[in-house]
Image (cartoon, rainbow, N blue to C red):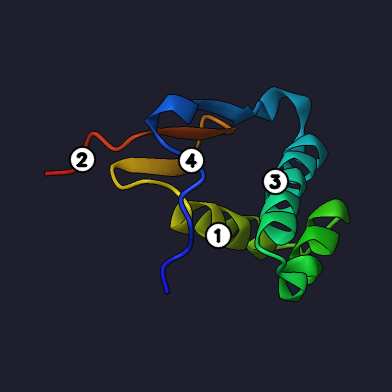
Amino acid sequence: MKPLVYWTKKDEGCYADGGFGLAYQRGRLAGLVRGIVVREYRPDLHWLVMSLESDGPGDLEDMFTAVELLQERTSEGMVWEFFSGDLMLWENDDAD
């Protein structure tokens, strides 16, 4: 079953300004993932929220896992990306 779509073109923008640092970005991602955990009752994802609220792994794999989770719940044609240090949701101009 495909996950529900929570983010669409109307939600386009910056979700975590890299200028505030890595801890800020991790906190913002934790909040977004926490929303999914609550809306979908997904206690199996609680580990990801906890990881994002900590210093996390050195390779930041938990952040990329969180972005993949967000992408799965985003409408087609929109993409989550880190751009110039910021977490952005925007329209994928590369789509054919």
Between disc 3 and disc 1, whose residue precedes?
Answer: 3
Between disc 1 and disc 4, whose residue precedes?
Answer: 4
Between disc 1 and disc 2, whose residue precedes?
Answer: 1
Which residue appears at 29% of the width and 38% of the height? 92
Near-viewer residue (57 or 40):
40
Density class for disc 4 (Cα within 10 Å; few <14, some 14-19, many ≥20) is some
Q: What's the residue type where badge 3 is placed?
A: Leu
Spatial CA span between label 3 and label 2 = 25 Å
Above or below, 96 relative to 69: above
Spatial CA span between label 3 and label 1 = 10 Å
Spatial CA span between label 2 and label 4 = 19 Å
Between disc 4 and disc 3, whose residue precedes?
Answer: 4
Q: What's the residue type where badge 1 is placed?
A: Leu
Between disc 2 and disc 4, whose residue precedes?
Answer: 4
Spatial CA span between label 4 and label 3 = 14 Å
For residue 9, which numbered disc appears in the image? Answer: none
Density class for disc 1 (Cα within 10 Å; few <14, some 14-19, many ≥20) is some
For residue 29, which numbered disc appears in the image? Answer: 3
Q: Given contact means CB atoms under 8 Å apart, are the residues at marks 1 and 4 in contact?
A: no
Position in image of residue 90 (x %, y %): 40, 32
Which residue appears at 71% of the width and 49% of the height? 35
Which residue appears at 77% of the width and 72% of the height? 43
Q: What's the residue type where badge 4 is placed?
A: Trp
For residue 69, which numbered disc appears in the image? Answer: 1
Q: Quadrant of residue 51?
A: bottom right
For residue 94, which numbered disc appears in the image? Answer: 2
Which residue appears at 82% of the width and 41% of the height? 23
Q: Given contact means CB atoms under 8 Å apart, are the residues at marks 1 and 2 in contact?
A: no
Spatial CA span between label 1 and label 4 = 12 Å
Q: Quadrant of residue 37?
A: bottom right
